[in-house]
Image: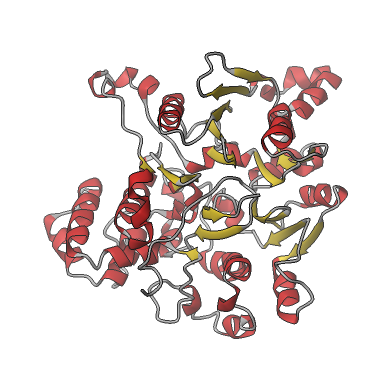
Amino acid sequence: MPPYKQPIPVHVTSEIGTLKRVIIHSPDSGLGKVVPSKAQDWLFEDIVHLDTMRKGEYDYYIKILLYFLDPEKVKGKIKEIDAAANQRNFYKPEHPDYFNSDKVIDPQYLLADILEVTDVKMRLIASICAVERCSYTTQGQLMEMEPKELSKTLISGTLPDKSMIFAPIPNFIFTRDIGIVINDHVLLNKPAKIARTREALLTQYIFYNHPLFADLREKIIELPESEHHFLLPDGEKDNKLVTLEGGDVMMVSANHLLIGCSERTSPYAANQVIKVLFEKNVVEKVTVIWIPKKRDYMHIDTIFTQVKKDVWVLLGTLSKKGEELEKRDVMESLMDGKVTDKLKIVQFIKDKDKPVHFEYLEDLLDDISKHDLQSGKKTRFIYSGNNEFPFGVREQWTDSCNLLAVKEGVVIGYDRNDKTVEAFRNTGFDVICAADLLHAFESGHLSPQTMENTLILLPSAELSRARGGSHCMSMPLFREKI
């Protein structure tokens, strides 16, 4: 069978096991359609320059992922790929010259595959047109399109003649939020914001209909609304709201899942996830972390991510370190509104009545390192902005805590977070920018297999303005066990 037609193994038991297969989405033309008046409605703080984001930034991310996960696609070809950067055909899922990896997978390519099936095509177009309130004529127009062009249009909202028929979904580059693999199951999201509804619908159709996931269909978890939700007055629905995004879910060990309750993920959704996972015996332990419902934080993976068994990067102002700083400066504590932003951490264990409480984020992460992962070493914490005022919160805003581990100890971050980079160096990590890394790979001076304890820096002027880092821009499908 050709690639993309035979089922693949899907299994994730940690945040740091060697990454073998991942879903990412290259910035599409919809990002270039974000206008100032709609930026916040579409969950952007600013408008971005699409060409720079693609050629100068995200394309490095793709090449690095390919070098680690599917090196045959890029090894010895970087100069050739870069020479054709103006066309970018290597990066376009609809183009014959697309890199076409079954290890680094773009959902646009998968979507085009399932649109080859007439029944799936009809149902998906009908669903999207209903959500987007399209005319009957538009629905017919979409049915006449070829799968590759239709896939592009359903994501970007733009027809081949450049006319827009519905809004773009610019957040689709943040594939972490569309779903999360929990051992051998997949939990699909229920987005909190209307701007992400079409993403969830496309993801649902891909996982249920693509041959890659044929063995997974009985292990897809979707969270239903409470039946009481439909009977409640509008003003009373919030308590029963089921909203969940993948940035609030972390698989930290085979038996332990973290769920964040944030502005995007509701406590009721967390409750539903715990019930389903315990009933299906998928995990034995779930820890719920309540974080302030602020745009600053968004998801738990904007506050902390894992680097090694015994190393984590996190935001100091929401941790034990932040409280220590407040105690040392009474006036700063009185003046600083963040002193009321306390995390609440509660751990639920299957078949045990009483939950376990953690006072500080460091306590939870230390417990994971020592007991779940058996690190055998003292747990170390790297703080955003080196925990220096005001760099901690400045650099957290530009995703200093949002890192993707391609293998244990080798993580991808952004080049603009200088103080966090300094903190990594102080902890004994090497630091290398993306361009230098690719050159070292091509020349043979470095190898993905032998690299360790390294922070890889992506160019990030435009990507960081979209408010998501390398962790956000990835949905791991398969990691080796650690």
| Above or below: residue 459 compared with residue 1 | above
The one nearer the camera, 34 or 118, is: 118
Query: Who's the residue at 26% across and 23% down the image?
Result: 227
Counting from the top left corner in percent of width and height, residue 232 is at 27, 18
Query: Who's the residue at 57% across and 71% down the image?
Result: 70
Counting from the top left corner in percent of width and height, residue 240 is at 36, 22
The one nearer the camera, 10 or 400, is: 10
Does the image show residue 35? Answer: no
Query: Who's the residue at 42% across and 29% down the image?
Result: 269
Q: Quadrant of the N terminus?
A: bottom left
Counting from the top left corner in percent of width and height, residue 265 is at 47, 32
Q: Is residue 342 left or right of residue 384?
A: left
Q: Is residue 445 left or right of residue 44?
A: right
Q: Is residue 469 left or right of residue 416?
A: left
Counting from the top left corner in percent of width and height, residue 390 is at 77, 38
| Above or below: residue 245 compared with residue 432 | above
Q: Is residue 275 left or right of residue 391?
A: left
- Report the label total: 0
Does the image show residue 67? Answer: yes
The one nearer the camera, 50 or 351, is: 351
Residue 61 falls in which quadrant of the image?
bottom right
Colour basis: secondary structure
